[in-house]
Image: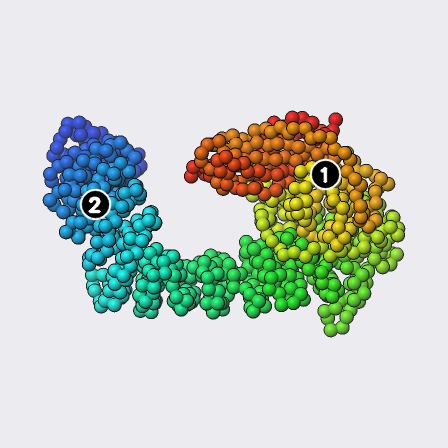
């Protein structure tokens, strides 16, 4: 039996012992309500809608009551209207067709003589109005903005806000009425009017000049709030109407941005708010925070800006984590605006590094980086190193990078610079980017007066700890390169110099080679280092020991290690010729460390993970500009790569003093390609041996590998006329078309240069274009940056690629394209294998 009373229905539902009982009861009552609706029982309609809304609140279907709500709205009784409008707001939204039937009822009730009936219509409009309804009732809303009743004006302002959000072009309809509303003495009306004007200024910047005329009026309103006495109606924790104050400050910030005259008008009141507001409670802090944002956004005086930054500094000592976080976040945005003012709070910011909240530590860390300069670099780096020692692993990669970049930029002397990087390598050697390691090697190579000091420091550090990968790589390279300096000078940083023997050096490197921490990259470095040491003045016993060690690795299962060991062992047996090849490298070119896309932000020696692995699966290796080929970034310039792509197949002659190595060992961070000359600097350019490539040429076939760089290059052979290149469409969707044009390199079989062209086929530009490509693991891919990530109609953007594949194999590409077209973000992935066979040469 159905329940005809809302109270009884609620009681019965609560009495249900199981979900099934409750569901059965609701279904039974819903059926009874449907039957009552079909009977057009006017007296029972109110009760049925009330019960239906309760059923809707419990999450059950109640859409069949929408039309009955409209019938209630048409009733002359206020109670029926109130329930009907409540039902419309709950059961309808702006996307339903039934909403068109509501427009006429709303228009009638907006002209009702009872202000509460008008309020019901305005409240419903503000919640569910669609674009069409906004256009239909905009005139009614505009008329009600001029009502003499404050209750109606307040609600009409919020309805105008809804209209502007739905139909921005109707903003002009409300401009004059809004300016009049800003003079209202009622706080509710003034609050809604300020909200409306703020939205209008953000939606339509052309309104700004007109509302800037009202700045003196807004200043008076704010001053009245600041200087007024106690008012029980609006007081919150001793502050008069903080909600209205915050809204007025936000509007003043928008109006003063970029306008000197408006900013001067509000300077005094902003200073008054900042000095008179009590900051001991959250209410006052909210007003102070809005004041700070306003001061920093407008054309304020320098003294006012300093005062605003001091307020943020005071926030940093607050016990509330949220306030400290907000202060750090804001200081991060303004530190470039007035660094000196922020510097005054440096100690407080550094204290935040020890905070228990990880979000605060992260923001304090970002701010600390921005505060480093020549005057405080020693203090700041010391504090950051102390934090690095206890920091979470997620912070260490960024911290090592920032500390080393700061040392490179602001170091008072080179010894301090070297000591700082050494400290970083000791504390977080597993979290150092390859660019930083490469920069450190360049620094050591260009500082001959500190090479003995650096070598002894790294020797001691490596003896103490071989678990830090970057420390091991740097120490191995420096000891191998400057072994004779270490043997001559010994340990230089102690009170009495202690000699180091060749036995100790070789023992240390062998212990590294045999340790559990040695990955393939470390083993490669150690093999190269001991090969270099063999050409230095060491005992015959150690020479023999090194030869035996190299021979033992010639049968290593890892192809890279085996290849290095075979070539190093062959080199080891060349006698006097070995010394010329293994002499010290000339110092590489000094340049500032610039970090771009760093291989998914991975530390040295890490493997491919994250998005690329997810995109490419287990059998594909990927590349995106700038390409890394899974190893360290290339030291070749874009000009060199472009020259090679556009047909200059023969490498240019080496320039004396250039950064190219003349010995088997390259500094950490330089390109480690799979060609023999890229790895060792020993052979002519030949394709890399892979699992499907031929065996490397025997050592007897080496050209002038062990001599000094040639000063002349042989003249290139006459090239036949280049055939017309054919383009292949790889992608054509959503107005974006991508074509690929391959160009084989006749001088280097297996090398194919590919030009990607991007163009749009309609009138809308394509923006934020990101083009990524991947090839199978048996192939390699290099990419240059795209000419422009925005492709405009009629223009063609390009991107250069180069694929190195085993001769005779087919080129397969997996492409990931993401871009924005007509305001919609698009991400797509396609496989392309449309190139003709024979591009890579071979039989």
Considering only vertical position in the picture, is 324 above or below 562? below
Q: Which residue is mark 1?
A: 649
Q: Earlier in the sequence, mark 1 or mark 2?
A: 2
Rounded to the nearest whole Å, what is the CA distance between mark 1 and mark 2? 74 Å
State the residue at coordinates (73%, 33%).
746
Q: Quadrant of residue 740?
A: top right
State the residue at coordinates (52%, 34%).
759
**Is residue 221 something one can see in this rendering?**
yes
Q: Which residue is mark 2?
A: 142
State the residue at coordinates (70%, 43%).
673
**Is residue 284 something one can see in this rendering?**
no
Horizontal side of 99 relative to 324 (left or right) equals left
Considering only vertical position in the picture, is 158 above or below 70? below
Q: Quadrant of residue 223?
A: bottom left
State the residue at coordinates (17%, 37%).
105
Which mark, by number, is residue 710?
Answer: none
Q: Residues within 10 Å of mark 2 (few under 14, many from 20)?
A: many
Horizontal side of 711 relative to 98 (left or right) equals right
């Amino acid at each position: 039996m159905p329940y005809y009373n809302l109270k009884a229905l609620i009681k019965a539902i609560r009495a249900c012992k199981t979900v099934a009982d409750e569901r059965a009861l609701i279904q039974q009552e819903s059926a009874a309500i449907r039957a009552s609706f079909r009977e057009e029982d006017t007296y029972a309609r109110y009760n049925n809608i009330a019960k239906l809304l309760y059923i809707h609140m419990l999450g059950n279907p109640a859409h069949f009551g929408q039309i009955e709500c409209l019938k209630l709205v048409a009733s002359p009784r206020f109670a029926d209207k109130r329930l009907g409008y409540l039902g419309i707001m709950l059961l309808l939204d702006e996307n339903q067709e039934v909403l068109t039937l509501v427009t006429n009822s709303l228009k009638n009730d907006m002209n009702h003589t009872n202000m509460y009936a008008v309020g019901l219509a305005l409240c419903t409009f503000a919640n569910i109005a669609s674009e069409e309804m906004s256009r239909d009732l905009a005139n009614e809303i505009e008329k009600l903005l001029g009502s003499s009743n404050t209750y109606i004006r307040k609600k009409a302002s919020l309805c105008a806000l809804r209209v502007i959000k739905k139909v921005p072009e109707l903003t002009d309809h409300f401009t004059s009425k809004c300016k009049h509303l800003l003079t209202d003495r009622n706080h509710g009306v003034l609050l809604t009017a300020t909200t409306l004007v703020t939205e209008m200024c953000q939606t339509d910047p052309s309104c700004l000049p007109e509302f800037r005329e009202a700045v003196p009026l807004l200043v008076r309103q704010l001053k009245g709030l600041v200087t007024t006495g106690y008012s029980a109606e609006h007081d919150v924790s001793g502050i008069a109407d903080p909600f209205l104050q915050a809204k007025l400050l936000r509007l003043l910030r928008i109006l003063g941005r970029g306008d000197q005259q408006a900013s001067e008008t509000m300077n005094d009141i902003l200073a008054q708010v900042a000095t008179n507001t009590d900051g001991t409670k959250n209410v006052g802090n909210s007003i102070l925070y809005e004041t700070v944002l306003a001061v920093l956004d407008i054309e304020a005086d320098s003294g006012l800006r300093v005062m605003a930054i001091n307020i943020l500094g005071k926030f940093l000592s607050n016990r509330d984590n949220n306030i400290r976080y907000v202060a750090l976040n804001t200081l991060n945005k303004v530190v470039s605006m007035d660094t000196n003012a922020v510097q005054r709070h440096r100690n407080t910011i550094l204290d935040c590094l020890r905070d228990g909240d990880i979000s605060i530590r992260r923001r304090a860390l970002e701010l600390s980086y921005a505060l480093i300069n020549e005057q405080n670099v020693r203090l700041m780096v010391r504090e950051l190193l102390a934090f690095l020692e206890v920091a979470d692993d997620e912070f260490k990669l960024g911290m090592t990078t920032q500390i080393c970049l700061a040392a490179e930029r602001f170091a008072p002397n080179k010894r301090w610079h070297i000591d700082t990087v050494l400290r970083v390598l000791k504390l977080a050697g597993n979290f150092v980017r390859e660019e930083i390691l490469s920069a450190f090697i360049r620094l050591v190579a260009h500082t001959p007066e500190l090479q003995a000091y650096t070598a002894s420091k790294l020797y001691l550090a490596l003896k103490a700890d071989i678990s830090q990968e970057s420390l091991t790589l740097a120490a191995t390279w420096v000891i191998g390169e400057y072994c004779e300096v270490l043997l001559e000078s010994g340990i230089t940083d102690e009170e009495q110099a202690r000699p180091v023997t060749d036995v100790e050096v070789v023992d240390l490197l062998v212990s590294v080679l045999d340790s559990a921490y040695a990955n393939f990259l470390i083993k490669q470095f150690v093999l190269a280092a001991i090969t270099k040491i063999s050409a230095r003045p060491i005992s015959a016993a150690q020479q023999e020991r090194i030869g035996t060690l190299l021979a033992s690795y010639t049968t290593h299962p890892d192809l890279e290690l085996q290849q290095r060991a075979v070539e190093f062992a062959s080199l080891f047996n060349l006698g006097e010729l070995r010394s010329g090849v293994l002499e010290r490298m000339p110092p590489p070119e000094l340049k500032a460390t610039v970090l771009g896309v760093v291989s998914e932000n991975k530390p040295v020696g890490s493997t491919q993970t994250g998005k690329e692995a997810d995109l490419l699966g287990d059998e594909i290796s990927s590349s995106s500009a700038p390409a890394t080929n899974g190893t360290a970034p290339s030291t070749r310039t874009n000009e060199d790569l472009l020259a090679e792509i556009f047909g200059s197949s023969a490498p240019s002659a080496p320039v004396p003093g250039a950064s190219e190595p003349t010995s088997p060992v390259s500094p950490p961070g330089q390109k480690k390609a799979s060609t023999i000359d890229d790895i060792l600097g020993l052979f002519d350019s030949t394709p890399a041996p892979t699992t499907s490539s031929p065996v490397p040429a025997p050592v007897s076939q080496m050209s002038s590998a062990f001599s000094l760089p040639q000063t002349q290059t042989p003249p290139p052979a006459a090239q036949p006329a280049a055939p017309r290149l054919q383009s292949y469409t790889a992608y054509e969707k959503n107005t974006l078309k991508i074509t690929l044009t391959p160009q084989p390199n006749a001088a280097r079989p297996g090398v194919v240069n590919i030009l990607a062209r991007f163009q749009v086929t309609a009138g809308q530009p394509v923006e934020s274009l990101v083009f990524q490509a991947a090839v199978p693991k048996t192939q390699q891919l290099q990419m240059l940056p795209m000419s422009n990530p925005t492709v405009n109609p009629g223009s063609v953007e390009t991107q250069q690629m180069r694929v190195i594949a085993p001769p005779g194999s087919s080129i397969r590409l997996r492409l990931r394209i993401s871009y924005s077209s007509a305001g919609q973000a698009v991400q797509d992935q396609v496989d392309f294998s449309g190139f003709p066979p024979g591009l890579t040469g071979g039989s």
